[in-house]
Amino acid sequence: LHATAVLVEADPAEVERLARDLERTGAGHRVRLTDDPAGLAPGEVALLHAEWADAAERVARYVGSADHALCFLAPPAPGKLPRPSLGALGTVEKADLLVSLPHADLRKLARYRGSPIADLPGHARQLVEGYSALFGDGRYEWMSLWRDAERAEGEREAEARLAERYAALLADAAGRTVRHVPVYLSDEPADSLHLFLATPDPLRALALNAALGAADALDGASLDRGFRSEVDAGPEEAAVLELFATEPAGEAPAAGPRPVDLPRLARTVRERFLGRRVAYGEVTGALLGTDVTPDELRRALASLKRTGEAVYRSLADAGAEVEFPEVPVPPARPKRSRRTAEMPMLGGLEEEGREAE
């Protein structure tokens, strides 16, 4: 891949730290301190010392020329990601937006739950204005929603309500699939995330599950695990899963994650779309609340294809059609070629293979 990277950081101390870290990894020669990422060569890393709101237009112009871009936005405070700064990126057809909601500061406002906005101390008022900018909400409706939910159901549920509101704002970008995945790595409030993936390609929406799995964070994700087997992966399966792990030699591999129950997944998908011809993207969309990965879904559909319970030519893109006939249509066996028919030895081998099946 001819990939480049653009890092935007407003804190000068963090800019220096990023530069040092890249130098330690041996990538220092690839770093360019610049005000504009335009003109980056393949493999280069642009380091922009700027507020995101000031750099957003420049980054969006650069991203618009890419074959594909993943834009990960993790603001340290709500005011650092004002809603208008997402506008330009939201119109880039080949850009995926992965946003981490800065929800931790909400807990700092909890002590002022009964105070009018005008009576808040300076630091609290600054946080309120920051969240208003994040939501693009000058009427402070977000605050009423949060206070009501926090009073009735607690802090975690109040955060979830605001996260749902933010997902709806991201979905306003036409033609995008938006996934909200809460991740709770422990019971500590600081160990929670609210991740949002806004993508124009629904096939990439499930890819977030694979990414969370690679980061050992999938177990903490608030997702439906109903398609997992009742038992964990055995030692042999765990050894395969840990093939590229960095465990000391001779140490026994731990039990792996529970494998997907492919028959159950295949049966559920077939029952959901029985008698219909739908786009592959619609099948993917039906599983966005689960922890199923794209590869697991393809394997489930392949099993249905073998029995004739699903008919499709390929699953190359979201628009590929998949038919789920009410009466299975087993695929036709390939015809024996004339040359095989003329060679008794090969023909006999073929018959033995059919008997083995």
Image: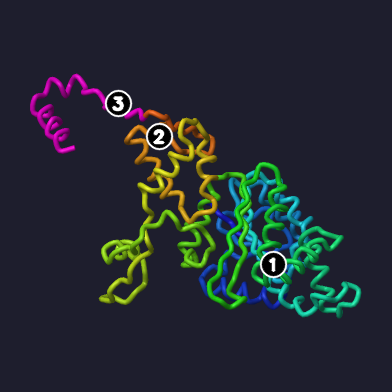
Would residue 324 be found to the left or right of residue 176 on screen? left
Task: Answer with left or right where residue 318 lies relative to residue 17.
Answer: left
Residue at the (32%, 36%) spot, across then down: 306
The residue that label 3 is drawn on is 332
Q: x, y (%) of residue 182?
A: 59, 63
Nearer the observer: mark 1 or 2; the answer is 1
Q: Amino acid at mark 1?
A: Ala
Identify the mark nearer the N-term, 1 or 2: 1
Query: Hey, which quadrant is residue 55 in on the image?
Result: bottom right
Mark 2 sits on what residue?
Answer: 310
Distance CA(mark 1)–CA(mark 3): 55 Å
Callout 1–callout 2 Cβ contact below 8 Å: no
3 vs 2, front mark: 2
> Could you tell me which secondary element the residue under label 3 belongs to?
loop
The image shows residue 255, relative to residue 71, as above or below, that is below
Magenta span includes 354: yes
Mark 2 crowd level (few <14, some 14–19, many ≥20, 10 Å Cα)? many
Residue 158 - label: 1
Of residue 55 and residue 247, the one placed in the foreground of this image is 247
Q: Position of residue 235 (x, y in %)?
A: 27, 66
The earlier-in-sequence mark between 1 and 3 is 1
Q: Is residue 334 magenta?
A: yes
